[in-house]
Image (spheres, rainbow, N blue to C red):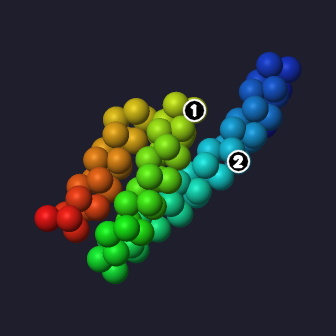
Amino acid sequence: MATHKSAEKRSRQNVVKRLRNTSVKSSVKTRIKSVLNAVEEKDNAASATALAVAIPAINKAASKGVFHKKTASRKISRLTKKVNSLKG
């Protein structure tokens, strides 16, 4: 356990940030799953709308520091690739 005043504050901040990060990660995973389910069902319209919801969520998580910028880019790229495979 932290003994210095600054270390105690840092510990409290870490708890809050961890809770926020897990919440954001969970919501992003849910949105990604909705895209993947639509792709699996080969529903072109549903997958496109789910992708349009998922991309801003992933970008926002990256801007807040929950995901690294390149991780977010990779996730978006792979999802877009799967959605576009339905069209062709």
Numbered disc 1: secondary structure: loop
What amino acid is found at the position of numbered circle 1 in the picture? Lys
Residue 36 visible from this viewpoint: no
Q: Across the whole image, how many numbered discs are drawn on residues?
A: 2
Q: Residue at x 81, y 26 (%)?
A: 9
Instruction: Look at discs 1 and 2 and give the one toward the viewer.
Output: 1
Q: Position of residue 15 (x, y in %)?
A: 74, 41
What amino acid is found at the position of numbered circle 2 in the picture? Leu
Q: Is residue 62 left or right of residue 2?
A: left
Q: Which residue is mark 1?
A: 64
Q: Residue at x 44, y 60 (%)?
A: 49
Q: Position of residue 36 (x, y in %)?
A: 37, 68
Q: Is residue 72 left or right of residue 21?
A: left
Residue 5 position (above or below residue 56): above
Question: From this viewpoint, which residue is outermost toward the bottom?
Answer: 41
- Nearest the camera: 11 or 47? 47
- Return the disc, 1 or 2, that comes first in the chain's sequence: 2
Numbered disc 2: secondary structure: helix
Q: Position of residue 38 (x, y in %)?
A: 39, 72
Q: Is residue 60 left or right of residue 36?
A: right
Mark-to-mark CA distance, 1 and 2: 14 Å
Q: Which residue is mark 2?
A: 19
